[in-house]
């Protein structure tokens, strides 16, 4: 049952057939909704519904999907080595899916099959008379069945779509639709039922309606009941066979000896061959990320196999596709797709609390790489003393105005605002894939000019609240740094680390020593082509560097010549 190509996988088959069945249920519910208007509207809607689903291609797609989807559910039960490792929501989806057949069999036989075999008129009048007027208990049963099928489908769609980047934004709308469609459908069904019941109070109408329906005879009913019983037996038999096959397989696997899995920290577990690595982790209480619940979609369960990699069977096409999507190294595999048959040593690559966000493909520059970037550090001078004389509310107000002004200057120059540290600012330029070093340096200088100008305006605005104007110190350097998304939980963002970052920070602190607003390294000057000949050049030692660094001390950043055109992103 392994995949034959990326386009023909069990996962894809389950998804496609599930979508077809969900579409069928949705059109069915929409038809019910017409009952909000009248029984006549329901019948009219049914004409369209039947016309669409009796078209040979759609009819084939429906029956084929029903069969394949059911067989895939049995396969899922067989394939899972330990049912208790299935996440609760997925277990619920599986159980709801299995419940659909026994819940809906009677209805399908009484309508579709009775119509095919005995030309019973499968109209809404017939359904509402039997499920509302004559047998409200059956109507309740069918309503539950429909809700079960709907919930099963919604859960399946949720598991599929939750990894999409747009899902969070669409979530309220999708949940709203998932709730409102069945509610309105049931109200429509009840309204239609009430109308049918009212009409049935007229014996002449009822006689005509029953004649038009062409109810099955006693013998025909007995045949339909027999068919129903056989379907229940067949369903139960296939389920029992699947469970028996699982049991036999685990007896065979238990005789194959044990496999040792070694986790980081020399933690070892022994397991029989058969379960996936993810199942082994879960069964042994080892936290392991699995956003998609082991369906091979999210990649969050990926592990680096440091020993025993060659003994693993090669990845399937779908596993390869997922690993390729995240640019995984050659010795990385999905824990939910490999079933170790030999000892292996692995390192999970994502923390166990990885979220759907970690499952999305990310641009290469977010995943970590070394790149030449320009780094800007800025710090408010003397703000600590100033804040001691102010009320906390005033301090927060002033700092937020300052952060907004500095942040805008950085963003307008095309930079990435990395973080605010106390009253300091760190910004990166050229961190994305397309930027070149010269452009990054010019952008950083443009940001420094903008920050200086913005501070002047801020000083004028706050003149009444300040004893003396706010002053800033800015340091800019360019060099190789490791750039990527780093952090933990909610505090994850694009940042950079490395000597170049430390140097930029050091240049910022030199502004105090040189009594100037901006200190830029000679590398910035060279790459940007900016003319700073009117300002002094100093040589300074930087911790961690063997050679001294030439820097220019610019008295006021606002006086720098413009070297960056924001509109064209050029010099
Ligand atoms: S758990 Fe999602 S790919 Fe393995």
Image (cartoon, rainbow, N blue to C red):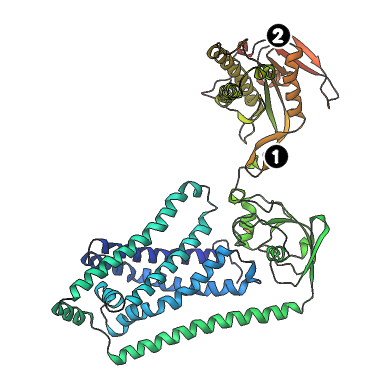
**Where on the picture, by quarter, is residue 4?**
bottom right
Q: Which of the two discs, 2 and 1, labels the residue nearer the N terminus?
A: 1
Q: Secondary structure at mark 2?
A: loop
Residue 535 marker: 2
Q: Main secondary structure of the magenta part?
A: loop
Q: Identify which residue is drawn at 54% across, 23% down.
A: 566
Foreground pick, 68 / 403: 403
Ligand 1 - quadrant of the structure image = bottom right
Q: Identify which residue is drawn at 26% across, 74% down.
A: 123
Instruction: Using the rendered image of the protein, determine whether residue 9 is visible from the camera's viewpoint.
Output: no
Residue 369 marker: 1
Give above or below for 560 relative to 321: above
User: Residue placed farthest to the bottom in the image?
Assistant: 219
Residue 149 coordinates in the image, percent (x, y): 44, 68
Residue 436 coordinates in the image, percent (x, y): 64, 29
* Part of the protein shown in magenta: 531-535
Is-magenta flag for residue 319? no
User: Residue placed farthest to the left in the image?
Assistant: 204
């Amino acid at each position: 049952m392994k995949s034959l190509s990326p386009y023909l996988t069990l996962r894809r088959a389950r998804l496609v057939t599930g979508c077809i069945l969900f579409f069928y249920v949705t059109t069915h519910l929409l038809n019910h909704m017409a009952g909000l208007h009248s029984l006549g509207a329901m019948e009219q809607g049914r004409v369209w519904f039947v016309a669409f689903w009796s078209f040979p291609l759609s009819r084939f797609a429906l029956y084929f999907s029903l069969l394949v989807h059911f067989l895939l559910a049995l396969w899922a039960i067989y394939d899972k080595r330990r049912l208790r490792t299935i996440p609760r929501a997925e277990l619920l989806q599986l159980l709801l899916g299995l419940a659909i057949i026994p819940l809906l069999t009677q209805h399908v036989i009484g309508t579709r099959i009775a119509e095919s075999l005995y030309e019973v008129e499968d109209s809404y009048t017939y359904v509402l008379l039997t499920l509302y007027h004559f047998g409200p208990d059956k109507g309740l049963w069918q309503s539950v069945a429909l809700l079960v099928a709907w919930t099963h489908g919604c859960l399946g769609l949720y598991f599929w779509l939750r990894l999409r980047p747009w899902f969070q934004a669409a979530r309220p709308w999708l949940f709203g639709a998932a709730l409102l469609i069945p509610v309105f459908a049931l109200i429509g069904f009840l309204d239609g039922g009430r109308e049918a019941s009212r009409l049935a109070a007229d014996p002449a109408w009822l006689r005509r309606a029953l004649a038009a329906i062409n109810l099955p005879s006693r013998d025909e009913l007995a045949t339909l009941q027999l068919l129903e019983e056989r379907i229940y037996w067949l369903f139960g038999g296939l389920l029992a066979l699947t469970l028996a096959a699982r049991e036999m397989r685990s007896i065979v696997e238990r005789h194959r000896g044990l496999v040792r899995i070694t986790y980081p920290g020399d933690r070892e577990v022994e397991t029989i061959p058969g379960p996936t690595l993810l199942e082994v982790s879960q069964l042994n209480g080892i936290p392991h990320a699995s956003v998609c619940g082991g369906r091979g979609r999210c990649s969050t369960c990926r592990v680096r196999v440091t020993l025993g990699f060659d003994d693993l069977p090669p990845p399937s096409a779908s596993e390869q596709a997922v690993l390729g999507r995240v640019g995984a190294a050659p010795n990385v595999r999905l824990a939910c797709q490999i079933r170790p048959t030999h000892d292996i040593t692995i390192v999970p690559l994502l923390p166990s609390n990885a979220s759907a966000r970690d499952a999305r493909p990310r641009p290469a520059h977010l995943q970590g790489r070394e790149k030449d970037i320009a780094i800007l550090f800025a710090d408010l001078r003397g703000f600590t003393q100033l804040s001691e004389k102010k009320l906390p509310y005033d301090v927060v107000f002033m700092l937020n105005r300052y952060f907004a002004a500095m942040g805008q200057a950085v963003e307008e120059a095309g930079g990435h605002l990395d973080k605010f540290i106390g009253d300091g600012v760190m910004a990166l330029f050229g961190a994305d894939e397309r930027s070149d070093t010269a452009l990054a340096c010019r952008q950083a200088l443009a940001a420094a000019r903008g920050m200086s100008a913005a501070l002047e305006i801020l000083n004028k605005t706050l003149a009444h609240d300040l004893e003396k104007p706010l002053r800033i110190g800015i340091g800019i350097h360019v060099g190789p740094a490791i750039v990527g998304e780093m952090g933990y939980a909610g505090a994850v963002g694009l940042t950079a680390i490395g000597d170049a970052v430390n140097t930029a920070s050091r240049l910022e602190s030199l502004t105090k020593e040189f009594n100037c607003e901006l200190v830029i390294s000679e590398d910035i000057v060279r790459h940007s082509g900016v003319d700073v000949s009117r300002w002094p050049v100093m040589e300074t030692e930087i911790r961690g560097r063997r050679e001294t660094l030439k820097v220019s001390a610019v008295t006021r950043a606002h006086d720098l010549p413009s070297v960056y055109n924001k509109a064209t992103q050029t010099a």
